[in-house]
Image (cartoon, rainbow, N blue to C red):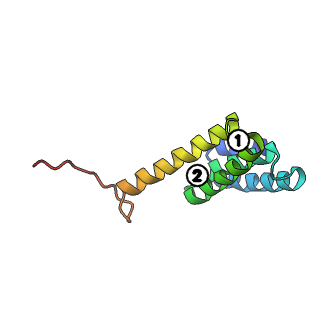
Amino acid sequence: MVQLASTYRFQGRWREAEELQVNVMEVRSKLLGEEHSDTLTAMANLAHTLRSLGQNIQAMEMMGNSIRVSSKVLGYSHPDVVQRIQSVTSWAEECRTDSSTHNDDGDTILESESSD
C-alpha cells in the first residue's frame, strides 16, 4: 500500500495517494503507535501530499504534529526532524509570499517602486 501511494504521488495522482496514505497512517498508528518512526514518516508523507493538493493549513498542521512527536522521540538534531522542520518552514514562507503578492481574487499583485 505504501509503494502504491508513493507511485500515485510521483504520478501526480494526489487524491488517490492521499486516500492510501491516510489508511497507511491510521494502520501504522494503531499497530505501531503514534511515536513509531514508520508512523511519523507516514504523517510526513501525507503532509506533503496535502500540500500538493493545496491544502496548506492541513499540511502544515500534519507536519507540525509529526515534528512535535518526532522531536520528542528522536531529538531536534535528527535528520528526519530537521528535514520536516525545513519543509514546514519553506511552506510557511511560500504562504506568506503568496498572500502578499495575491489579492483575495487570486490575482497577482506586482509591487512597483515609486519614483520621487
Most foreground residue, 85 or 32: 85
> Can residue 74 be seen from the camera position used here?
yes
Most foreground residue, 78 or 98: 78
> Can residue 13 be seen from the camera position used here?
no
Q: In this view, which residue lies farthest toward the bottom?
A: 104
Q: Position of residue 60 (x, y in %)?
A: 60, 54
**Mark sitting on residue 7:** 1
**Can you tell which quarter of the image residue 56 is in?**
bottom right
Q: In this view, which residue lies farthest toward the left?
A: 116
In terms of sequence position, does the residue under pointer 1 or pointer 2 come before the other? 1
Up-down: is 20 above or below 78? below
Residue on which the image places disc 2 = 51
Answer with left or right where residue 21 lies relative to residue 94.
right
Q: Position of residue 86 (x, y in %)?
A: 58, 41
Q: Residues within 10 Å of mark 2 (few under 14, many from 20)?
A: some
Answer with left or right where residue 91 lies relative to residue 111.
right
Q: Residue at x 70, y 41 (%)?
A: 7
Q: Position of residue 92 (x, y in %)?
A: 51, 51
**Can you tell which quarter of the image residue 15 is in?**
bottom right
Answer with left or right where residue 29 lies relative to residue 66.
right
Q: Residue at x 39, y 60 (%)?
A: 106
Q: What is the three-letter code of the residue carrying label 2?
A: Arg
Q: Residues within 10 Å of mark 1 (few under 14, many from 20)?
A: some
Q: What is the three-letter code of the residue carrying label 1?
A: Thr
Cα distance in 3D space between marks 1 and 2: 17 Å
Q: In this view, which residue lies farthest toward the right?
A: 31
Up-down: is 65 above or below 89? below
Q: Residue at x 41, y 50 (%)?
A: 97
Q: Residue at x 69, y 45 (%)?
A: 8
